[in-house]
Image (cartoon, rainbow, N blue to C red):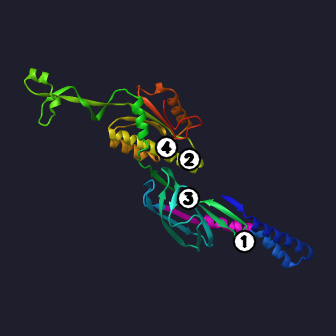
Amino acid sequence: MRIAFHKKGLCLYLLFLIASLVFSSFFGGAVSFVWLYALLLLLPVSFFYILINYKFLSIYQTMEVHKVLKGDEHEFTLALENDGFLPVHRMKLSTYVDRCVLKDIEDGAEVSLDPFKRKELTSGLSCRYAGAYDVGAGFVSFTDPFNIFTLRFKVPYNFRAIVSPRITDVGEKVVDIENIVNSTGLKSTVQNEDIPGSDMRAYEKGDPISAINWKISAKLGDLVVRLPDKKEKRTLTMILEAADVPEIKWDTQFLKDRDRFLELIVSCAFNFAGQGVPVKLIYPSGTIREKTVNSYESFLEFYNTVADGIFYSSDAEVDKLKEMITDRSSIYGDETIILIRERPESGEEYCAII
């Protein structure tokens, strides 16, 4: 709960209070003291009235689906119910305008509710960033009848959306860097070299003439062709260093950083899945986990969990990932390691080969 006083209303209240005190001191009488006591009780009675309103206020928020795609619009419902015997006057709704777009519910919209009444507001809602965070209405505000102060409360029930990132071509640059630098000889499962290799099989109708091995064919008395070797690809490990930020500090900048981070890592994973080239992803999901993506199916497994699956369960897991970054011996193999930082510090690169 937060309280904010309005200067104009507060000054007028104090002015009338002082005037009433002076009047009662000089003239006395029941009428003057009734007015003075009414002014003295105005603030505590208004405060208590607002607390009762909030105590008996029920707010339910829901969307047709919990897991959505960034930018897609879905129907959002906000239900407000006054379970108390006192009416709610001109309650203001504060929405998360920094992270979602509500077409038909304005930020700061005023709602009044009679005793034991219910009201539903519906609107199209689209999420601005990938990740998992609260959307819809975040706070309600009540102002006393004389505009002296406002009490602001967090809504009794939040709605958390799980927003999947869009798959774009932002990961192609990372893939290009990896292909230029690394050469460890991993064989692709779906692509072949352009020239024939040393493996043989019997000639079949439709095989190119240039693939026939004439010397071996002459020895065997049957036509045989040379088979192309599997195309050489690169062995790659990607370490995804997510920021360790408590949820209470998730501001707009954090959501933007997380959105860029998720879009890049899923785009990279999708690029390699399309090539049939394995990429090992090391990332925090409570504990430090490893996931190999080498097909569309394995990519979908990663993609369906990444929106709300990047987090640390303890400081020990943060230290463990940092140790893996500084000590390459903890990662098996001689593969190239690409480090993607969600929030690089001064002098650090957002994406770097280590």
Q: Main secondary structure of the magenta part?
A: helix
Asked whether 283 or 194 is in front, the reply is: 194
Circle 3 packing at 10 Å, graded few (<14), some (14-19), many (20+), is some
Q: Secondary structure at mark 1?
A: loop
> Residue at (50%, 69%) from the top-left corner?
120
Looking at the image, residue 25 sits to the left or right of residue 77; the answer is: right
- What is the distance, in whole Å, between disc 3 and disc 1 at their CAs? 29 Å
* Disc 3: which residue: 97
Choose the circle earlier in sequence order: 4 or 2.
2
* Disc 1: which residue: 146
Identify the amino acid type marked 1: Phe
Q: Is residue 206 magenta?
A: no
- What is the distance, in whole Å, between disc 3 and disc 2 at their CAs? 15 Å
Q: Residue 275: x percent and y percent?
A: 33, 38
Residue 201 visible in this rendered orientation of the protein: yes
> Residue at (45%, 43%) from the top-left corner?
264
Choose the circle earlier in sequence order: 2 or 1.
1
- What is the distance, in whole Å, between disc 1 and disc 4 at their CAs? 48 Å
Residue 309 visible in this rendered orientation of the protein: no
| Placement of the N terminus among the 4 image quadrants | bottom right
Q: Secondary structure at mark 3?
A: loop
Identify the amino acid type marked 4: Phe
Q: Residue 178: x percent and y percent?
A: 41, 33
* Disc 2: which residue: 254
Identify the amino acid type marked 3: Val
Q: Residue 274: x percent and y percent?
A: 33, 41
Residues rendered magenta in the picture:
43-61
